């Protein structure tokens, strides 16, 4: 007979959750479905219904958009629960309350409730889940909902983990849906084409619920238009709904103006002198998505809350400077578009010819990222992005080498699989050559660097 031992801390709960099948770590699930999640939620009194939801999916930028939404809502006086992934330095970044974390007692109480549920399920050989053990992410998601309910959250900002249609978060019925830029990612699970991946992301669209959509490639946009029409979901396409102007990009952040247009094309809201702490024009458009989403969910939101929320918002590993000597920037860029934007911002501030330490997990668009990076750095050190996810640094090295020959670019290319040694070598070289340093390619690499150097 299974007996439940109460947890003593939030880290105990997370360590226990890590014993379950975890797709992030390359484990294979028997199947992807929402049935298990829906069954467990029902058995715990459907905590996903404890507060209204803004639901965010996409390939890139959804963490920033989710966080900006939450920060604006918190600035307006609401108690906001945020669910995001992956974390960079602290697992509680995934489940948090406003600009901080839930109280430790909340994590513990919700964890004990979750453990009691799994004990019941295990005793019945998971009969209520068709005989299949729940996954790490399913239980993590339910832990968040239980925390949000215990904390009496007034609204939840929720980021999907992967995909959308079968993501564990997709049991919610949100006020508003947000989908960021779609790129090739998680192709082993979501499909190998932009339309296939867009179709999976579009699975979060709910009948009659507004969809706020970032600028998309034509083939992705067609998928979203089709799904929105079939679901009767009003579509608010960012390039048609807002105008971003007066962008001033600096190493300290980005300032801009925002104008929102009604269906007739008339400006219905104008906000000037907005500021975000993160450099990079891409973050301005993430902010535009966040503002539009919040206004569709809460039309009465005031301009002061929008300005205050954006100004207060920050996230680790989003063009974050972690050292001054040498200048060391880390960024979680891990797709073609995000790497292009990251490198453009970095070279705009610090010039070409810097040092790059690069590591990405398996399944990413490696060739495109190598194409972007090779001409812009004098030294590239290839490493593993930590040990949490599967990575093939030798393949990455060969891809960068082939790209340097293709472009006829001479670079100092090194393979140092051990992450700590790679980072130490990169810092030493940057100091010797008096060059800035960028670490990019993965959230996991950014986390390893940040953990070591902060």
Image (spheres, helix red, strand yellow):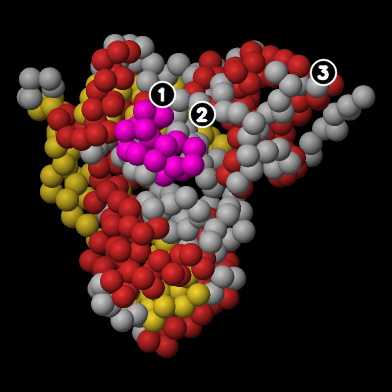
* The one of 64 and 39 positioned closer to us in this rendering: 39
Q: Is residue 354 visible?
A: yes
What range of the chain is rendered magenta?
185-200
Residue wearing tag 2: 167
> Relative to residue 409, is residue 433 drawn left or right?
right
SS class of the residue under badge 2? Answer: loop
Q: Quadrant of the C terminus?
A: bottom right
Near mark 3 (Cα within 10 A), the count class, few <14, some 14-19 or many ≥20, is few
Relative to 180, residue 154 above or below: above
Is mark 1 in CB contact (under 8 Å) with mark 2? Answer: yes
Is mark 1 in CB contact (under 8 Å) with mark 3? Answer: no
Mark drawn on residue 124:
3
Near mark 1 (Cα within 10 A), the count class, few <14, some 14-19 or many ≥20, is some
Kindly identify the residue that appears in the image at 26 percent across and 68 percent down.
Answer: 347
Residue placed farthest to the right in the image?
1
SS class of the residue under badge 3? Answer: loop
Horizontal and vertical percent position of residue 15 = 72, 44
Determine the CA span between mark 1 and mark 3: 32 Å
Horizontal and vertical percent position of residue 110 = 69, 28
Residue 268 lies within the magenta run: no
* The one of 441 and 241 positioned closer to us in this rendering: 441
Q: Quadrant of residue 398?
A: bottom left
The numbered mark, 1 or 2, whose residue comes first in the sequence reads: 2
Q: Quadrant of the N terminus?
A: top right
Residue wearing tag 1: 203
Determine the CA span between mark 2 and mark 3: 25 Å
Horizontal and vertical percent position of residue 415 = 50, 75
Residue 191 lies within the magenta run: yes
């Amino acid at each position: 007979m299974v007996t439940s031992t109460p947890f003593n801390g939030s880290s105990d709960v997370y360590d226990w959750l890590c014993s379950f099948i975890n797709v992030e770590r390359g484990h294979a699930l028997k199947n992807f479905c929402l049935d298990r999640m829906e069954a467990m939620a029902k058995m715990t009194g459907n905590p996903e219904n404890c507060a209204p939801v803004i639901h965010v999916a996409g390939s890139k930028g959804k963490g920033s958009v989710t966080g900006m939404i939450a920060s604006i809502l918190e600035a307006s006086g609401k108690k906001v629960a945020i669910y995001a992934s992956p974390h960079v330095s602290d697992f509680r970044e995934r489940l948090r309350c406003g600009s901080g974390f839930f109280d430790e007692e909340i994590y513990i109480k919700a964890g004990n409730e979750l453990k009691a549920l799994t004990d019941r399920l295990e005793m019945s050989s998971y009969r209520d889940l068709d005989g299949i053990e729940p996954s790490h992410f399913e239980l993590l998601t339910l832990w968040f909902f239980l925390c949000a309910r215990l904390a009496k959250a007034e609204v939840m900002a929720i980021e999907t983990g992967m995909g959308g249609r079968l993501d564990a978060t997709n049991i919610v019925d949100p006020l508003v849906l947000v989908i960021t830029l779609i790129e090739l990612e998680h192709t082993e699970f979501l499909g190998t084409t932009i339309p296939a991946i867009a179709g999976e992301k579009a699975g979060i669209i709910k009948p009659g619920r507004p969809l706020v959509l970032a600028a998309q490639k034509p083939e992705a946009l067609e998928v979203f238009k089709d799904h929105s029409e079939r679901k009767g979901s009003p579509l608010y396409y960012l390039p048609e709904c807002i105008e971003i102007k007066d962008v001033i990009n600096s190493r300290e952040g980005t300032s801009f103006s925002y104008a929102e247009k009604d269906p007739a094309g008339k400006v219905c809201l104008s906000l000037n002198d907005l500021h975000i702490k993160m450099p990079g024009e891409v973050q301005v458009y993430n902010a535009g998505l966040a503002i539009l989403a919040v206004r569709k969910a809460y039309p009465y939101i005031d301009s002061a809350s929008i300005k205050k929320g954006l100004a207060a918002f920050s996230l680790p590993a989003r063009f974050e400077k972690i050292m001054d000597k040498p200048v060391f920037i880390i960024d979680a860029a891990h797709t073609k578009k995000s790497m292009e934007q990251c490198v453009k911002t970095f070279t705009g501030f610090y010039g070409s010819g810097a040092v790059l330490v690069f590591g990405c997990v398996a399944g990413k668009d490696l060739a495109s990222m190598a194409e972007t990076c090779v001409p812009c750095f004098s030294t590239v050190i290839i490493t593993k992005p930590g040990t949490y996810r599967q990575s093939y640094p030798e393949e990455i090295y060969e891809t960068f080498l082939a790209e340097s020959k293709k472009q006829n670019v001479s670079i100092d290319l090194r393979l140092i699989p051990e992450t700590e040694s790679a980072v130490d070598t990169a810092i030493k070289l940057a100091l010797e050559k008096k060059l800035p340093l960028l670490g990019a390619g993965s959230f996991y690499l950014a986390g390893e660097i940040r953990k070591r150097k902060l």
